[in-house]
Image (cartoon, helix red, strand yellow):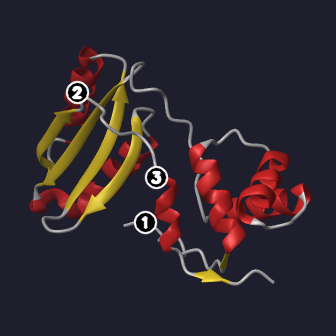
Amino acid sequence: MTESKPIPDWEFKQRDVIILKELTRDPQLSSRELRAILADDHGIEVSHVTISESIRKMRRDGVFREAIIPNEEYLLFSLFEFQFDPEHFAESWRVAMEEIRADEHTFMYFLSDGEYQWKTIMMFENREQESRWIHEFYKEHGRLVNNLRNSVVTNVLKFGTDPELFDSLNLVRDR
């Protein structure tokens, strides 16, 4: 469907993992603050310039992504699942896919295994705006879609990445 992005080919050093973990805890940390954490908590002595360069390279090489995510108190989040009419899929899928991907309400857009479906997490100001979006989507792409199922996200119980997730990355020894 879309060009697949290459998987980052990154050799994780211990300091890279620590930097990712610390930025996950507090994305606003400066390179000087990270230098102090590396030195004081982990015995790793590097300059703040080296840390800045490391972060810049990880960003450039796609090791992590940055996104501005509104607090869930400001917008309503919904999970949409699109089921297709196979008869009209071949001639209609690309335009619909590109429109969903480019839509201002789309936060995350992905495919799932099992039953082939598109899924997206979307954000709206209110339920009326969400309902209008669904109505307009069906008007434009109704031949393609057998069913659009939406689930309202009512209580966000966790919103973030645990720093410990990075412990499982393959490490090379710092040189």
For the residue pair 32 and 119, the one nearer the viewer reads as: 32
For the residue pair 57 and 19, the one nearer the viewer reads as: 19
The answer to whether residue 168 shows anywhere in this view is: yes
The residue carrying mark 2 is 154
Q: Position of residue 171 (x, y in %)?
A: 61, 80
* Residue depth check, mark 2 versus mark 1: number of the one nearer the observer: 2
Tell me which corner region of the image, top left, top right, bottom left or bottom right, holds residue 10: bottom right
Return the mark for residue 166: none
* Amino acid bearing label 2: Thr
- Tell which circle, 2 or 3, labels the residue nearer the N-terminal end: 2
Residue 118 appears left or right of 102: left
Q: Is disc 2 placed on a helix, strand or loop? A: loop
The residue carrying mark 3 is 162
Q: Is disc 3 placed on a helix, strand or loop? A: loop
Return the mark for residue 2: 1
Q: Position of residue 6 (x, y in %)?
A: 55, 75
Tell me which corner region of the image, top left, top right, bottom left or bottom right, holds residue 61: bottom right
CA neighbours of label 3 inside 10 A, class few (<14), some (14 to 19), many (20+): few
For the residue pair 62 and 132, the one nearer the viewer reads as: 62
* Amino acid bearing label 1: Thr
CA gap between label 1 and label 3 equals 30 Å
On-image quarter of the N terminus: bottom left
**Looking at the image, is 33 positioned above or below residue 61?**
above
**Residue at the image point whose x is 24% and y is 15% from the top:** 128
* Amino acid bearing label 3: Asp
